[in-house]
Amino acid sequence: MSLEDYAFVLDYLQQGRPDDRSYRKTPLIIAIGENEFKLLELIPKTNAVCAVGDRIYVGSNIDLRTKILSVKRRISYSDLTNAAMNELQFILESIVNQHEERFVGFFNTAQPINARLHSLELLPGLGNKTMWAIVEERKKKPFESFADLTTRVKTLHNPQKMIAGRIIQELEERHEKYKLFVSR
């Protein structure tokens, strides 16, 4: 079911979901996948200790799953607990920082979607002027890091937060016609 190998814990529900009416409540972990940003509900192994922010293996190799018994299901943003929603921005920023090369590569290779819209403009808080500044700077030389990006493009502040914000928008699935980071 899960094409993710690793996920980050957003919330740990020791007694399962409060709205679960079954007699035996199963502990649950709510997590977000590291690569495709899939939201998952996981069943932990008995006596497994997990904390919010932990990176855990959820891949198909059962022998490597030290804390997870199974992936119960893929969930939507609306299925997240309030605690998970509160942690999401921070954990996404951490993932973006850990995979800096991948996301700096997005700034180096992002292309126009159509004649009126560039994929860079889909990042929250990034307007037309900043988009053109990024395009002009990357023509000179590809960006090497987030620090390089913010140094060379003076109007760009905290690109990690912008990317995390965009991922949340895509997870919320309000009116997001274009997906930049989240797997469908």
Image (cartoon, helix red, strand yellow):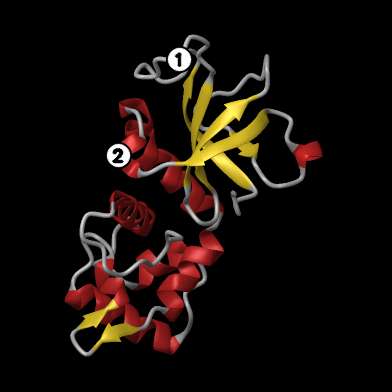
Q: Is residue 44 above or below residue 164?
A: above
Marks 1 and 2 close (CB-CB < 8 Å): no
Q: Would you identify the image quadrant in which residue 50 lies? A: top right
Q: Position of residue 91 (x, y in %)?
A: 44, 40
Tell me which numbered mark, 1 or 2, is placed earlier along the sequence.
1
* Nearer to the camera, 127 or 40: 40
Read off the residue under disc 1.
Answer: 22
Picture coordinates of residue 18, whole percent (x, y): 37, 16
Res 39 quadrant in image? top left
Q: Residues within 10 Å of mark 1 (few under 14, many from 20)?
A: few
Mark 2: which secondary structure? helix
- The residue positioned 36% from the left and 55% from the top of the image is 167
In the displayed structure, 133 sits above or below 5; it is: below
Residue at image x 23%, y 73%?
130
| Image point (25%, 86%), residue name | 114
Residue furthest to the top? 23
* Residue 136 drawn above or below residue 49: below
Q: Helix, strand or loop at disc 1?
A: loop
Q: Quadrant of the C terminus?
A: bottom left
Find the residue positioned furthest to the right: 63
Query: Where residue 173 is drawn, which disc sits there?
Result: none
Q: What's the residue type where badge 1 is placed?
A: Ser
User: Total label count?
Assistant: 2
Residue holding disc 2: 78
Amino acid identity at mark 2: Ser
Left or right position of 149 against 124: right
Name the residue at 36% across, 34% down. 80
Q: Residues within 10 Å of mark 2 (few under 14, many from 20)?
A: few
